[in-house]
Image (cartoon, rainbow, N blue to C red):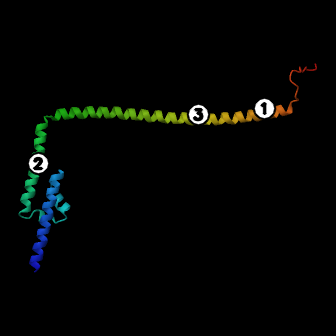
């Protein structure tokens, strides 16, 4: 009975490894014995077990061939890639400089807007003070009817 239970458990785990292997191949994930064992939640030993090891090695080899074919078919040399990297790096420097300039412009704009708001508030307060002073002056000065000429006694 114990043998049957262990055998059944082993078959379930092997099935889980094979299912996980198929999923990893389909997803295009890099296949390694350790990664497969972890993903399938089984021991590393089981991944190297006879029957599974061959299937895993075959999948790894297929993945390696596919990568080599893509690299060979790309036609890009190391020099070409280096040149592309230099161009991308230069463009990145330019973009970073532009970003920094725009940040500085935004900071200046915010400061200008804040100063404008302070000046508006000061203008409003000054206007209110002038209106209050004018009102007070009007109250304290004598009123003359319209058209009457006032003369200064000298």
Residue drawn at point x = 17 percent, y = 55 percent: 24
Residue at numbered disc 2: 64
Residue 101 x %, y %? 42, 32
Report whether 42 appears left or right of 139: left
Are the residues at dot 3 and dot 1 in contact (C-beta closer than 8 Å)? no
Is label 3 in a helix, a strand or a loop?
helix
Residue 108 x %, y %? 50, 33
Circle 2 residues within 10 Å: few <14, some 14–19, many ≥20: some
Q: Earlier in the sequence, mark 3 or mark 2?
A: 2
Give residue 90's mark: none
Residue drawn at point x = 10 percent, y = 42 percent: 69
Compared to residue 2, the image places residue 35 above or below, namely above
Report whether 121 appears left or right of 153: left
Q: CA distance from mark 3 to mark 2?
A: 65 Å
Residue at numbered disc 1: 134
Q: Quadrant of residue 21?
A: bottom left
Q: Quadrant of the C terminus?
A: top right
Q: Earlier in the sequence, mark 1 or mark 2?
A: 2
Q: CA distance from mark 3 to mark 1?
A: 26 Å
Q: CA distance from mark 1 to mark 2?
A: 91 Å
């Amino acid at each position: 009975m114990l043998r049957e239970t262990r055998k059944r458990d082993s078959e379930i785990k092997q099935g889980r490894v094979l299912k996980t292997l198929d999923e990893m191949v389909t997803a295009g994930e890099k296949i390694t014995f350790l990664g497969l064992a972890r993903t399938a939640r089984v021991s590393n030993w089981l991944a190297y077990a006879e029957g599974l090891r061959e299937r895993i090695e075959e999948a790894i080899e297929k993945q390696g061939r596919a990568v080599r074919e893509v690299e060979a078919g790309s036609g890009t040399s190391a020099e070409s890639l280096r040149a592309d990297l230099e161009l991308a790096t230069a463009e990145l420097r330019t973009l970073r400089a532009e970003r920094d300039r725009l940040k500085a412009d935004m900071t200046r704009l915010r400061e200008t807007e804040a100063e404008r708001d302070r000046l508006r508030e000061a203008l409003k307060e000054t206007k209110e003070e002038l209106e209050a002073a004018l009102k007070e002056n009007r109250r304290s000065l004598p009123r003359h009817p319209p058209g009457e000429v006032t003369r200064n006694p000298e």
